Amino acid sequence: MSNNRLSQSSLSASGEERSTRASLVANSLRNRIMAGELEPDMQLRVQSLADHYAVALSPVREALNRLASEGLVTAHDMRGFFVSSVSEAELDELTRTRCWLNETALRQSMAEGGAAWEEEVLLSYHRLSRLTRRTPTGEVSAEWSDAHRTFHRALTTGCRSEILVGFCDQLFVQAERYRNLSRQAPAASPLQRDDEHRIIVEAVLARNADHAVSLLNDHFAATAKLCRSVLLSRDPGDARRTSA
């Protein structure tokens, strides 16, 4: 099943609940937004999406409302749904908030996480370090993206707060969208990127909380810096003239 289109049979199978169809549509739209295929400020027409996915209007509306709750879609009165905007100001706020929440989660994880948590962090890093970020066509590898998200989530899971872990994970998704939109910007080399992850893990395993937090914050700041130049060069009017 591709990100661009779901098979009609998967969405119209007999006995399948509306919520399941809505989940399939939401997952596909989320992937397309995250990949940058559906660009910021692009209008998302309910009827067009229903035709595209071969479903009724109701599952599409439910899917769009779910994505709105995640911050990926915005609903405007009398105008419908749009892919959420991006801006330098939001990127700065997102980065600051990621630093605040992830610092709390990481410090708490390092204070309370035991051997099982350390093993989770180490295994997630090893999996990530063995993958290549780019596919031969230059796209971001879905497997690498999944491993990257798992690694950053693992850093927080020892804090024993599912709510805090959930907030950190949601902010990761928002930041990853900016990263993908800025894929044409000069990126750090694979070796440099792996070194950043490796030294974070080393500080975590050494239980040096101050150093680990500083490294993680620097990692977030470096990502934001890569995104900023591309944001400044975007023409926000381009996406508004198109729709999905």
Image (spheres, rainbow, N blue to C red):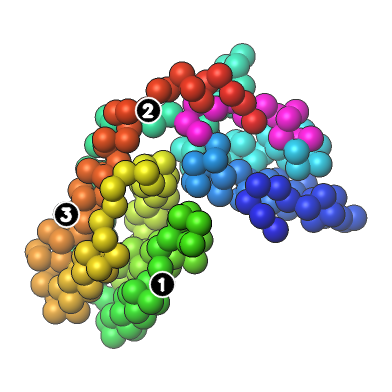
Q: Quadrant of the N terminus?
A: bottom right
**Frontmost residue, 122 versus 127:** 127
Mark 3 packing: few (<14 Cα in 10 Å), some, or many (20+)? some
Which label lies toward us, 2 or 3?
A: 2
Q: CA distance from mark 3 to mark 1?
A: 22 Å
Label 2 vs label 3: CA separation? 25 Å
| Quadrant of the rendered image containing residue 199 | bottom left
The count of marks equals 3
- For label 1, the SS is loop
Q: Residue at x 64, y 41 (%)?
A: 63
Q: Is residue 40 magenta?
A: yes
| Circle 3 SS class | helix
Residue 14 is one of the magenta-drawn residues: no
Q: Is residue 178 above or below residue 161?
A: above
* Residue 89 spot, x, y in % from top left: 27, 29
Image coordinates of residue 101 in percent, x first then y, are 26, 52
